[in-house]
Amino acid sequence: MTDEILMVGVLVVGALACAWWLTGRLRIYALSAQILDVPNARSSHATPTPRGGGVAIVLTFLTSLPVLYALGELSAGVAVAMFGGGVVVAGAGFADDRRHVPARWRLLAHFMGVLWVLFWLAPAIASPLSAVLPLAVAFPVLAIFMVWMLNLYNFMDGIDGIASIEAITVCALGAALLWSLGQPDMAVLPLVLAACTAGFLTWNFPPARIFMGDAGSGFLGLIVGSIAVWCLSLGLPLFAAWVILLATFVADASVTLFRRALRGQRVWEAHRSHLYQRAARHFGRHLPVTLLFALVNLFWLGPIALLVAHGWVPVLIGLAVAYVPLMIMAWLLGAGQPDEVPLFGGD
């Protein structure tokens, strides 16, 4: 056990260091090639900033998969699922970062990546799924959930550090849940993803010196969603616990898009009316908002997820306790409202 813990520690530190080094190199390249995110009316930043740093997360994590397989920490099916799906989604995001790709083609790539993941994970999750829903219904629902997750990450990657902090806290808490359930081998994958993201965060922490880009945010959304689905192999409560850990992002994005749809606005168009964006403008800084999301994850959602994962609280009750207050708060604080409406204003 001591040797295994040491090995995992080396992997985690190595992933963090590699992502940190790659992000620095990508920043130099982006500056020299003028790959910059230039502020516009929908931006939450004020100065041109290099983008595409999330590629460091992608490359480091994908490189770690064969290493984890070789060390016996990951099955071939899971490694192939994450690698193939990640390449497709990150590739589509990278192309969009460099040159705009129409939404329909991005969405097609997203579904291709998701279906690849589900194909390889199906043997592990089919039996637990069939106990809840017919597989003909369950797999399409999971596909939509995963596509929503990776697009949600794109929506929520709008201020410094927030997408990174979300991935780190969710993956660290998810790994802790797996460890507490006697599944230390499964805990390694989310820990490595958290480490890759932490290496990038050293450059993305407010004030950010480089942005993640769609390649990184879509990739994170896919892999976090894929890990959650993989955990279905241990039963519905653990999957529900992962969904609970993601509640801050899901609540903000869902309420924002719902309110914009009610107003007849095009929900697929870029905007800056998410609650986290409105809060950042209210405070005049990104840091308090990013840290608040981390605190909610650690001290509100984490304990609820623990109770649900161990079966001490029923799944539906846990989901309600986690989501209902966050969605009410998002609505009351004006998620989806235009700029002129103050944070503590109403309709």
Image (tube, grey):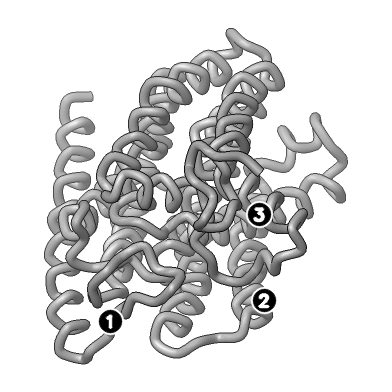
Q: Looking at the picture, how far across and down is residue 220, in whole percent?
A: 43, 56
Q: Nearer the viewer, residue 188 or 70?
A: 188
Residue at the top extreme, as displayed: 312
Tell me where residue 235 sits by quadrant: top right
Q: Nearer the viewer, residue 111 or 326?
A: 326
**Dot 3, how many residues are within 10 Å of its Cα: few (below 14), some (14-19), or many (20+)?**
many
Give the label on residue 36, or none.
1
**Dot 1, how many residues are within 10 Å of its Cα: few (below 14), some (14-19), or many (20+)?**
many
User: Mark 3 — residue?
Assistant: 257
Residue drawn where x is 57% and y is 57% of the image: 338
Secondary structure of residue under mark 3: helix
Q: Amino acid at mark 3?
A: Leu
- The C terminus - image quarter: top right
- The N terminus - image quarter: top left
Q: Comparing marks 3 and 2, which lies closer to the viewer?
A: 3
Are the residues flagged by discs 2 and 1 in contact, CB closer than 8 Å? no
Q: Looking at the picture, how far across and down is residue 118, in whole percent?
A: 65, 56
Q: Amino acid at mark 2?
A: Leu
Residue drawn where x is 18% and y is 39% of the image: 7
Lateral position of residue 283 relative to residue 296, left or right: left
Q: Comparing marks 2 and 1, which lies closer to the viewer?
A: 1
**Dot 2, how many residues are within 10 Å of its Cα: few (below 14), some (14-19), or many (20+)?**
few
Q: Earlier in the sequence, mark 2 or mark 1?
A: 1
User: Mark 2 — residue?
Assistant: 108
